[in-house]
């Protein structure tokens, strides 16, 4: 059993791909089906997504196809094809079953696709790339994307689109350079600016605040309901690690050890919770208290780890 992209269905089944074929394994580890999808999606697999219905969606740089969860056979008569895209981002499935497919090319395009494979709407922008994931508001009604502004100065902006129609609701007045990172349950959109600071926007994008922590922020890694935001930071010459920034933009803690694959667990009643990451140089999982940065424990593994979930 091998594969680079993995997803878990609601019944505990494992769906994975090696870039050429998609395989479905039961929760007990038995192979249910395997299907070569290269010809049907016009290239190698970029992403997988599994709907609540069990339907498996698989995408390449310009094509999306739906696979029956029982047989692996195509659920649509023909795949959805984006005209000339050369790259695409992760698939997103909305609460109503709509598939959101972000592609690039001469212009980027975000397409909302109905569960039967027909397009609901398309939004075209001017970033030229489609490798990023659209970010949705907590209620799923607004999709946020990074856009290049007009002109040649490299300035960018965040736009908010109606998830129902694709119509532009909001455009940010602040210069966004690093894409949309995440949307918190408290209604804040996080992005990056030209100086690798963290930007905070309210849901209507009409203002922004800059967290000038002095860190080189490249993404958000965890946004707990309470407590500081955990961000991915660049380490000089040694890869990435993680740090925490409070609501005033101050650095609460920062790790100088290279870390990857970070994610948070926030059980009820435990405040901001615990952050877990992989230390690739020592092949350990490290547990860090988000509120303080205290290391709770670390565990070394014999086999090389590529990720945790």
Image (cartoon, rainbow, N blue to C red):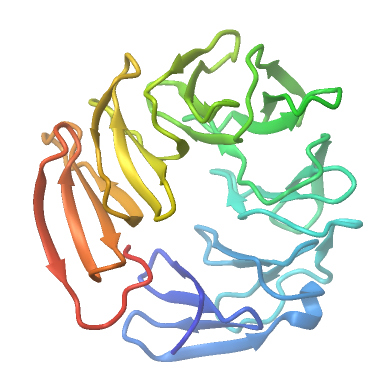
Left or right of 222: which side holds 165?
right
- Residue 291 as seen in the image, left or right of residue 86: left
Residue in view at x 31 percent, y 79 percent:
304
- Return the x and y of residue 248 as percentages of the image width and height: 32, 13
Q: x and y percent of residue 92 in the render?
A: 59, 50
Q: Residue furthest front?
A: 237
Residue found at x 78% / y 38%:
127
Answer with left or right where residue 248 lies relative to residue 105: left
Question: Where in the figure is residue 307, as x and y percent of width and height?
Answer: 36, 67
Give me the residue at 54% from left, 29% from top: 192
Q: Camera-side residue: 285 or 114?
A: 285
Q: Is residue 129 positioned above or below 35 on the image?
A: above
Of the pair 73 and 175, the residue shown nearer to us: 175
Query: The C terminus appears in which quarter of the rendering?
Result: bottom left
Q: Residue at x 69, y 27 (%)?
A: 161
Whether residue 2 appears in this view of the structure is yes
Against 277, residue 282 (above or below) is below
Where residue 143 sits, quadrant-wise, is top right
Please indicate whether residue 180 sits to the left or right of residue 221 in the image. Answer: right
Indicate whether 246 appears above or below 97. above
User: Can the viewer see residue 163?
Assistant: no
Give above or below for 29 relative to 202: below
Closer to us: 231 or 236: 236
Image quadrant where residue 216 sits: top left
The furthest residue to the top? 207
Quadrant, the N terminus: bottom left
The image shows residue 11 at horizontal and vertical percentages of 37, 69
């Amino acid at each position: 059993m091998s594969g680079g992209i993995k997803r878990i269905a609601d019944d505990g089944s494992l769906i994975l791909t090696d870039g050429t074929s998609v395989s479905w394994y039961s929760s007990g580890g038995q192979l249910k089906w395997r299907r070569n999808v290269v010809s049907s999606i016009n290239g190698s697999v970029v992403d997988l997504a599994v709907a609540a219905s069990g339907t498996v969606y698989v995408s390449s740089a310009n094509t999306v196809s739906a696979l029956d969860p029982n047989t692996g056979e195509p659920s649509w008569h023909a795949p959805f094809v984006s005209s000339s895209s050369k790259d695409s981002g992760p698939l997103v499935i909305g609460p109503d079953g709509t598939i959101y497919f972000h592609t690039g090319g001469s212009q980027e395009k975000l397409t909302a696709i109905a569960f039967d494979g027909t397009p609901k709407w398309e939004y075209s922008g001017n970033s030229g790339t489609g490798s990023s994931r659209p970010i949705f508001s907590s209620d799923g009604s607004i999709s946020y994307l990074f856009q290049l502004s007009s002109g040649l100065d490299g300035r960018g902006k965040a736009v908010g689109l109606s998830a129902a129609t694709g119509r532009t609701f909001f455009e940010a007045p602040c210069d966004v350079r690093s894409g949309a990172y995440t949307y918190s349950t408290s209604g804040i959109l996080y992005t990056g600016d030209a100086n690798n600071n963290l930007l905070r926007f309210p849901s209507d994008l009409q203002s922004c605040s800059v967290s000038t922590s002095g860190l080189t922020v490249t993404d958000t890694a965890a946004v707990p309901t309470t407590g500081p935001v955990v961000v991915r930071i660049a380490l000089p010459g040694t890869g990435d690690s993680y740090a925490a920034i409070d609501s005033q933009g101050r650095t609460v803690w920062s790790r100088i050890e290279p870390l990857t694959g970070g994610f948070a667990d926030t059980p009820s009643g435990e405040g901001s919770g615990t952050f877990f990451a992989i230390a690739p140089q020592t092949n350990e999982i490290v547990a860090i208290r988000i509120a303080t940065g205290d290391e709770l424990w670390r565990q070394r593994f014999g086999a090389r780890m590529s990720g945790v979930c």
